[in-house]
Image (spheres, rainbow, N blue to C red):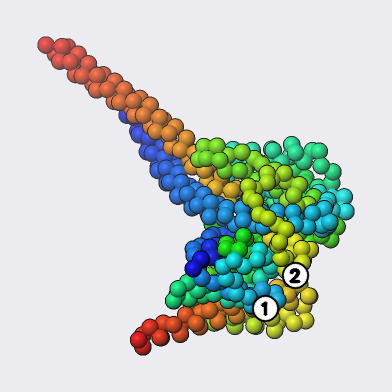
């Protein structure tokens, strides 16, 4: 059966080529993931220190402190920031966060969506959500300065009384194989339910310049931006981890497929040889 | 003599931490120098130079806006939006960036207040980087002469 042999051969070749691609994507994703995870970890000290500082201000000022960013906004709309990836082939990454966000959003009132990443933007638009802005091309190693416009949009919307709350939906990176969708309320600040940091400073003798209110007006937006930045980094790390796993699975099944095809190929080849020998020997027998 | 423990952090990384004799920071109300046993203090920072003296060594940083905190008298935390050590700065690139910032500022003089504030902040940051980069250039010359 020479025709079928050729068919199987070309099939093996094509699977082999596909496997080369998935293997390459797997390795690229692995190295990008390492970078994204490192960036996430590098950013953590700032978050911890800034929150400690924030707590010192709040503690010092006590209940006398009223700041517009600490209470729910006067608006009647909700703002949701959805972090997804620009590219697909990342397993269930975009599907999972999208599903989680839609599930949570059911209980919200009127909601505006800001999509970060092309996939989320496309999906939300298709599903008929009110996508007010979409940011794409933030890529693999996002810079802090790149999230400022996104955060600015949210903060301005909140302070101008358009939104009641600002929430982030992103994929939290736990490990190379586990990532979970997460919701974080960034505005009003402090509603996110972050556990208090372990720090004991006798805050009574604190000098605050120029005053607590002005300091908070600077600090809260800063913390909000940092939350955006961290969410973007986490999401990027998760994206690459998910892609790495998806590509690893694809490479593995390509190898299995190649093995079974090679087995079939050998069987067909052996069947051909056996048949030829049978023909020759029966021909010889007929002559004798 | 007791020393100060300092940490300079930005959202992107920990720029530097260590021990020092004194740390000078540009606050909204002028430059202040923090020595060990300073009272706990929390203040906003302007874009400017940040100077760290330790023994005979002086290190310069260009920092943008942010805040800083003196904790327990001997620990200082600088939370800056961006900060760079002088030897990370490239004078040529900064001169160009400063020029761009100035041009940008001139171009939007008639724009909105926010645009103007953004451009001013940008220019201030580039000016700070420029000054620190100039200092680094000088200290290099000194070394060459010596």
Query: Which quadrant of the view contains residue A147?
Result: bottom right
From this view, report whether residue B31 is shown above or below residue A156: below
Which of the labelled discs sits on residue A210, or is there none? 2
The residue sitting at 50% across, 83% down in the picture is: B134
**Residue A120 visible in the current orientation:** no
The chain identifier of the residue carrying mark 2 reads: A
Instruction: Judge left or right: residue A90 versus residue A271.
Output: right
The residue sitting at 41% across, 30% down in the picture is: A257
The residue sitting at 45% across, 44% down in the picture is: A26
Q: Nearer the viewer, residue A175 or B2?
A: B2
Residue B131, image x and y in percent? 55, 81
Q: Are marks 2 and 1 in contact (CB under 8 Å)?
A: no
Residue on which disc 1 sits = B30
From this view, report whether residue B135 is shown above or below residue A271: below
Q: Secondary structure at mark 2?
A: loop
Q: Nearer the viewer, residue A70 or B78?
A: B78
Query: Which quadrant of the view contains residue B71?
Result: bottom right
Instruction: Judge left or right: residue A198 versus residue A132.
Output: left
């Amino acid at each position: 059966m020479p025709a079928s042999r050729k068919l199987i051969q070309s099939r093996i070749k094509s699977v082999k080529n596909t496997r080369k691609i998935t293997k390459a994507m797997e390795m690229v994703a692995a190295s990008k993931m390492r970078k994204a995870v490192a960036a996430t970890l590098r950013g953590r000290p700032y978050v911890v220190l800034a929150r400690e500082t924030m707590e010192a201000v709040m503690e010092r000022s006590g209940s006398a402190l009223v700041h517009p960013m600490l209470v729910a906004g006067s608006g009647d709309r909700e703002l949701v920031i959805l972090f997804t990836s620009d590219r697909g082939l990342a397993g269930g990454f975009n599907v999972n966060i999208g599903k989680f966000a839609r599930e949570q959003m059911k209980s919200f009132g009127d909601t505006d969506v800001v999509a970060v990443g092309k996939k989320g933007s496309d999906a939300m638009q298709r599903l008929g959500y009110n996508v007010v802005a979409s940011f794409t091309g933030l890529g693999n190693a996002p810079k802090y300065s790149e999230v400022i416009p996104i955060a600015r949009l949210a903060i301005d919307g909140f302070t101008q009384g358009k939104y009641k709350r600002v929430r982030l939906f992103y994929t939290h990176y736990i490990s190379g194989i586990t990532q979970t969708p997460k919701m974080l309320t960034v505005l009003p600040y402090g509603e996110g339910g972050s556990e208090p940091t372990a720090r004991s400073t006798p805050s009574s003798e604190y000098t605050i310049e120029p005053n607590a209110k002005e300091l908070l007006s600077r600090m809260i937006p800063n913390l909000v931006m940092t939350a955006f930045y961290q969410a973007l980094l986490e999401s990027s790390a998760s994206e690459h981890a998910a892609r790495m796993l998806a590509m690893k699975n694809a490479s593995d099944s390509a190898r299995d497929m190649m093995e079974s095809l090679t087995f079939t190929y050998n069987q067909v080849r052996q069947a051909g040889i056996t048949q030829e020998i049978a023909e020759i020997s029966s021909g010889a027998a007929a002559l004798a | 003599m007791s020393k100060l423990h300092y940490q300079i952090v930005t959202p992107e990384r920990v720029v530097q931490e260590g021990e020092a004799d004194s740390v000078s920071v540009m606050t909204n109300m002028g430059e202040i120098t923090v020595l060990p046993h300073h009272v706990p203090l929390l203040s906003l920072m302007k874009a400017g130079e940040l100077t760290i003296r330790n023994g005979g060594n002086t290190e310069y940083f260009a920092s943008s806006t942010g805040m800083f905190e003196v904790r327990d008298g001997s620990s200082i935390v600088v939370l800056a939006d961006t900060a760079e050590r002088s030897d990370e700065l490239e004078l040529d690139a900064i001169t160009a960036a400063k020029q761009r910032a100035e041009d940008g500022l001139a171009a939007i003089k008639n724009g909105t207040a926010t645009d103007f504030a953004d451009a001013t902040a940008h220019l201030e940051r580039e000016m700070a980087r420029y000054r620190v980069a100039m200092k680094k250039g000088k200290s290099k010359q000194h070394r060459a002469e010596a």
